[in-house]
Every structure is written in structure tokens, then in C-alpha cells.
Amino acid sequence: MTTVLQEEERTEVDNTWTDIGAEDTLFEDGECSGVVVDGVKIALFRVAGNVYALDDICTHGNACLSEGDMDGFEIECPLHAGAFDIRNGKALCAPLTRDTRSHPVCRRADRILIQVKSK
């Protein structure tokens, strides 16, 4: 499920970080989640206590990575089974030929903050 954050639901922090919500709320349905920040679809992944963010679109097909299967630090595209490393967006196998963008994530208390650069 992808959550579209309304302006009143998020706050700009330090002009570069965007507070996208409480960690427990973002991951209440599992270890993968999708959000939209400033019109950019973002996939969030939680592994071993860390949160990672990638563009929520496969570079091979038009599928949401947040709906894929996660195994350790790999997310498998639900469309053609290509896999990305969630830590850096690297394409790991065919049919993928291009990496996806990763985005910096940090925590402040129980809040998740992200830096998203427009494409």
C-alpha cells in the first residue's frame, strides 16, 4: 500500500530532510512500505533495525518495489523477478540493466526522515 502524504501530515526539517511519519505507523503492515513525497513514489524497507529508501518503481517494468518480496537486503520486483539491493539501489540480476535511486534516511526519536531529490 502506498501512502500519499498531505502537506499537513509531513514537515520539512532543516530544509533538506522531510519527516514522513512515525516508524511504527509506516511499517504497520510489514517490512515494506510505500509513500509519496513531493510527487515522488518512495519504497521504504526495514531490515535489521535500519530503514532504507528507494524509488518505488522498477527500472525494467512499471511495478512498485514496495509490493515485491524482500529477502534480507534484496527486494524482488513483483513483475519480472529482477532484484535490487535495498541499501544502494544496485540492480542485482537480469532482467534489470539499470540501478534505481536510493535516498538518505535518518531517525529522530521514533520519526523517519528522508531526503528526496526530484528527478
Image (tube, rainbow, N blue to C red):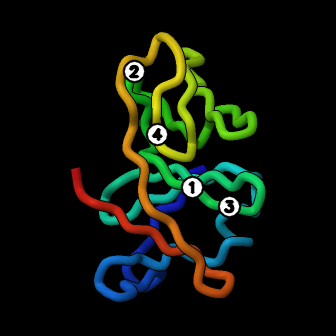
Q: Amino acid at mark 2?
A: His
Q: Is residue 106 left or right of residue 97?
A: right
Q: Residues within 10 Å of mark 4 (few under 14, many from 20)?
A: many
Residue at image position (68%, 82%) is 110
Q: For the residue labelled by badge 2, is the local secondary structure a helix, a strand or a loop?
A: loop
* Residue 50 x/y as whole percent: 68, 61
Q: Amino acid at mark 4?
A: Gly
Residue designated by label 3: 50
Q: CA distance from mark 4 to mark 2?
A: 13 Å
Which of disc 3 and disc 2 is earlier in sequence? Answer: 3
Q: CA distance from mark 2 to mark 3?
A: 26 Å
Residue designated by label 2: 60
Residue designated by label 4: 89
Q: For the residue labelled by badge 1, is the local secondary structure a helix, a strand or a loop?
A: strand
Q: CA distance from mark 1 to mark 2?
A: 21 Å
Which of disc 4 and disc 1 is earlier in sequence? Answer: 1
Which of disc 2 and disc 1 is earlier in sequence? Answer: 1
Q: For the residue labelled by badge 3, is the local secondary structure a helix, a strand or a loop?
A: strand
Tag 2 near tag 3, CB within 8 Å: no
Residue designated by label 1: 52
Q: Nearer the viewer, mark 1 or mark 2?
A: 1
Count the labels in the image: 4
Q: Amino acid at mark 1?
A: Tyr
Which of disc 4 and disc 3 is earlier in sequence? Answer: 3
